[in-house]
Image (tube, rainbow, N blue to C red):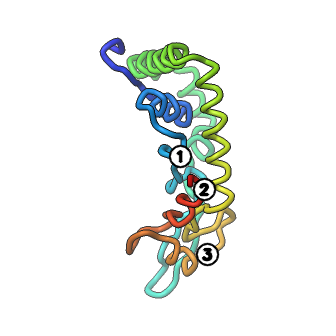
Amino acid sequence: MFKKYDFVGVVERFDESLVVLQLLLGLESSDILYFAVNRKEQWYRRKIGRNNATCLKPFDWELDLAVEPPVSQYLIQSKEWHSQNYGDYLLYHAANLSLDKTILKIGLDLFSQELKKFRQLMKLAEEKCSPVFPCSANGADQFEDSRFDCMAEGKFGCGHRCLDEITA
């Protein structure tokens, strides 16, 4: 099935997947820069009552639920779980192999060089123009600041102002 596709990306290898796509399409590193707005660790703001709000820590099933002994035991040791999800495991393995083969076809040296360049640009973008979210990384409310860091009304954490400066 994978032979019919020129590109298969893997979410857990998102940066690598983007760099492969960049090279296949003949793009620049600056063309694929991104800001992850919905991060797993990002606190979120919830209204409490009419005029108040608070920042809440996100629920992370891997940390908050999967570590519970009955859940962990079922996910790791259960033959039933594995057999019910065997097709997903097979597809995931095939997607990773496909991505690896595409990287080798492009050339490991070129890919490694472009991945390093991309990660340096991502780090610079994060340092220079990280979006302001309604809640900080430690759960402090910063809603008023976040309201002015956007491209369109009602959108939070766009960070658009700075990317043009970094990629120029």
- Do the numbered discs 1 and 2 sit on residues whose CB atoms are within 8 Å? yes
Q: Which circle's residue, 1 or 2, is located before the other in the chain? A: 1
Instruction: Determine the secondary structure under disc 2.
Output: helix
Give me the residue at 50% from left, 54% from top.
38
Residue underneath mark 1: 30
Cα distance, mark 3 to mark 1? 31 Å
Q: Is residue 8 left or right of residue 149?
A: left
Q: Residue at x 30, y 15 (%)?
A: 4
Q: What type is the residue that disc 3 sits on?
A: Asp
- Identify the residue shown where x is 66% and y is 61%: 128
- Name the kind of residue labelled 2 in the image: Ile
Vertical placement of residue 159 versus 93, above or below: below
Question: Where 120 sits versus 124, above or below?
Answer: above
Q: Which label belongs to residue 166?
A: 2
Q: Is residue 80 visible?
A: no
Mark 2 touches mark 3? (CB < 8 Å): no
Residue 45 appears in the picture as rendered: yes
Whole-angstrom CA distance, mark 2 to mark 3, is 28 Å
Quadrant in which the N terminus is drawn: top left
Q: Is residue 75 above or below residue 46?
A: above
- Quote the CA–CA distance across marks 1 and 2: 8 Å
Residue that mark 3 sits on: 141
Q: Name the N-terminal-most of marks 3 and 1.
A: 1
